[in-house]
Amino acid sequence: MTSSRARLTVGVARAWRRRWDRQQERLIPGREERFDAILDAIGRAVGPRFRALDLGCGTGSLTERLLDRYPEARVVALDFDPITLRLGRTALGDRAGRVTWVEADLRDPRWSVSVPAGRFDAAVSTTALHWLTEPELRRVYHRLGDLLRPRGVFLNGDSFGFAPDSKRLARLARAASDAPDPSPGGGESWAAWWRAVLREPRLADEAAMHRARFPGHHERTPTPDLRGHERLLRDSGFREVEVIWGRWRNRVLAAVR
Ligand SMILES: C[S@@+](CC[C@H](N)C(=O)[O-])C[C@H]1O[C@@H](n2cnc3c(N)ncnc32)[C@H](O)[C@@H]1O
């Protein structure tokens, strides 16, 4: 019997990735602008020749943009979802040795054992770390403090919650479509993309693994708000922590080691 792994072509993987980007653009207004803010900041902070770690890389959207913008950069792209990883790996390959794909669970205290050795100049993440609880995030940031070189930078683009007493601002943020309905008419929603990809026969093995690894995948995790992230980063040895780009709750948090 031919394994499903043999049948996923580069063209099919690229088509799924394009669909991924389209639904993420609908879900996250300003997504491309946010990527740009991260790309610009990384070059300014550590220069054009760097080694970066992309946490929760998904299909490699940010990894690809980093490699395109900085031809001398190398990226370790880490995720635990067998579907998004397979799509990224198949579509992008290793870009002449510049990308290393790593399968690791950030919820696992030993998540970094499969990260190739050596200090990083930068770490990045987009729309990923909100899946982690406070204790998990504390461990990830603590380890990240060891993985980054002194003056290395961490750039995290995500939706960061407001403080509990910012009720009016939270209402305004909702009204400003900061958290748009993921399935308004026209275009594919995030949930619809997942429903479709889980039915893709060429990814049947990965779909089974996905279900086992993320049984409550579509459930919300109680995750820290912006101030919680800032505190955890400072507790982990990051000396400077600031928001460097934002649209309501959608922000880029930068931290210098
Ligand atoms: C919404 S996607 C974002 C992907 C990509 N960074 C982007 O901006 O398109 C969130 C990613 O975080 C990954 N993720 C969630 N929980 C994770 C965990 N515990 N360990 C590693 N990756 C995780 C998911 O598998 C998924 O690929």
Image: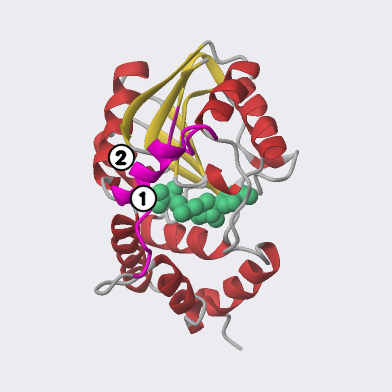
Q: Residue at x 39, y 45 (%)?
A: 171
User: Quick one: which residue is furthest to the right in this view?
Assistant: 109
Q: Residue at x 51, y 58 (%)?
A: 85
Q: Secondary structure at mark 2?
A: helix
Residue linked to disc 1: 61
Residue 27 visible, this angle? yes
The one of 95 and 121 positioned closer to us in this rendering? 121
**Earlier-in-chain disc, 2 versus 1:** 2
Q: Coloured how?
A: secondary structure
Residue linked to disc 2: 35
Residue 102 visible, this angle? no
Q: Tag 2: Cα neighbours inside 10 Å, few (<14), some, or many (≥20)?
A: some
Judge from the rendering whether residue 68 lies leftward or rightward of residue 2; answer left or right.
left
What range is drawn magenta here?
155-183
Q: Is residue 254 above or below residue 218?
A: above
Tell me the distance, in whole angstroms, between the alpha carbons under discs 2 and 1.
Answer: 9 Å
The one of 136 and 154 positioned closer to us in this rendering? 136
Residue 146: image quadrant is top right
The one of 248 and 207 positioned closer to us in this rendering? 248
User: Quick one: which residue is furthest to the front in this view?
Assistant: 168
- Count the labels in the image: 2
